[in-house]
Amino acid sequence: MSASDIAGLFKKFGGSPAQYQEITQAETEKASQKRWPSMFGGKKAAAEAEAHAEEPDEQPEVEPEVTPPAAPVAEKPVLDAPVAAPEPLPAPSKKPSSKTPDAWSSAGLQSLLAKLANEAKAPATPEPEQPSEPEPEPIAVAQPPRSKPELSDIKVVAVVSGKGGVGKSTMAANIAAALHKVGRPVLAIDLDPQNALHHHFQPEGEVSEEQGVVRFEQDWREQAVPTKDGVFVLPYGLGDEAQRRIFEAQLADDPLWLAYRLSDLELSEGAVVVIDTPPGPSVYLQQALAVANVALVVSLADAASYTALPMIDRLIASYTDERDDFAGTAYVVNQIDPSRQLNKDITHVMHGLLGDRLIGRITRDQSISEALAYNRNVMDYDPHGRGCRDILDCTMALVGYFASDDEGA
Ligand SMILES: Nc1ncnc2c1ncn2[C@@H]1O[C@H](COP(=O)(O)OP(=O)(O)OP(=O)(O)O)[C@@H](O)[C@H]1O
Ligand SMILES: [Mg+2]
């Protein structure tokens, strides 16, 4: 099903008018800007800071200077010996394809792996037509009742996957920490009711049960948790079931809810927002993709993750097609075990199909899961380990994606 078909379905479903709730920030803005000047330092903040410059008691706190680290020392992972060419690559367009290449089926994967095993040199013959898998049910999305606010000063990365447990939260947290290390102001938002993202960081002070996006009526400047890693984190929060249902209804009713919340924050220029999402289709994924400049798909190097990729690719296409500010989809293969040939082969096949859209190959590294046990990110926990190097490489490739997006703009 093409993106235009899906857009047609959305029109058909229609929706009720949005009930976007304007949040009055006049009372809290000044205090928040003083508290976190570098993160929430938008234009209005800058003007206000100037107005108060002569008042001796109102000096803004100075955020510790960020020293970008030297370029990652890790060598780019080098692929093994060349293998038989897989199915013709999708055009190296950054836009996700709404068509599903046959190679993405499990039979296609078997065929590509067989070619690898045989080290066949002959050009690939066309794969037999595979029965197409059932189309996922599109999510009914209300027509946007208003235009999307301007977010061109910031970059938004939505971390997504078709399957659960692949390492989205781990990647979101560690990439957020790495982005801060290379000098970007970073806000990490947990849009997953599992509420796990903030566990990857060391908060400055207590995280109250009241803090979280699930309490959608509250001011995010008060909700964001400053962490020792320099990243500001907005937890999902600990609302009860009723609160969660109300929140999800609000999100379904107003597809631009997150866009307006981000706009209201007036984040400083160059800030990056990293959004963690639940696996598969959801109102959270829809909200994240409505503002994302880059969708970062996390996958394992196994057959189940591999065959789930077309589903998430179609979802991304349905929410980002026709948006000029969407730079494209990037992919990360996570938890690669170099001692397992199948892991290496599937990674190799994916590289053949995705080309430079595969921006990360992350080794399975015990330090990554251990870091979580201590509320740390791996850069802090094991800065010289393989997992840390892989994540820094991936982060630098992501920054390159931002740069190419700016050039194309
Ligand atoms: N590269 C890695 N090396 C070792 N362990 C990893 C790696 N990446 C993730 N893990 C571990 O895998 C488990 C699942 O990771 P995570 O919770 O980030 O997945 P997820 O995709 O966010 O899951 P869900 O879909 O439930 O939200 C965690 O225990 C995490 O520590
Ligand atoms: Mg998660």
Image (spheres, rainbow, N blue to C red):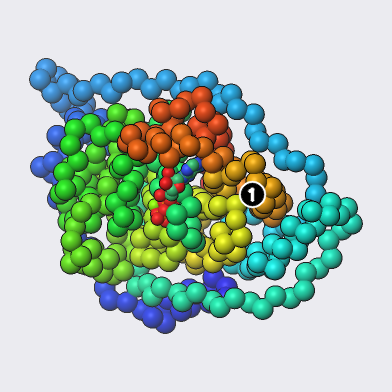
195 lies above or below 130: above
Closer to the camera, 348 or 61? Answer: 348
- Badge 1: few (under 14), some or many (20 or more) residues near its Cα, within 10 Å? some
| Residue where numbered disc 1 is placed | 343
Coordinates of residue 382 in the picture (x, y in percent)? 45, 27
Residue in the image at 67% along x and 51% along y: 342
Q: Amino acid at mark 1?
A: Asn
Residue in the image at 75% along x and 63% along y: 111
Q: Is residue 293 visible?
A: no
On the picture, is 132 further left or further right than 263? right
Q: Quadrant of residue 362?
A: top right
Coordinates of residue 255 in the picture (x, y in percent)? 34, 64
**Outermost bottom residue:** 12
**Outermost top residue:** 56
On the picture, is 277 further left or further right than 383? left
Q: Quick one: quadrant of the N terminus?
A: bottom right
Secondary structure category for the residue under label 1: helix
25 lies above or below 245: above
Residue in the image at 20% along x and 44% along y: 223
Residue in the image at 49% along x and 65% along y: 315
Q: Quadrant of residue 131?
A: bottom right
On the picture, is 330 further left or further right than 236? right
Coordinates of residue 109 in the picture (x, y in percent)? 69, 62
Q: Is residue 199 visible?
A: yes
Coordinates of residue 158 in the picture (x, y in percent)? 43, 51
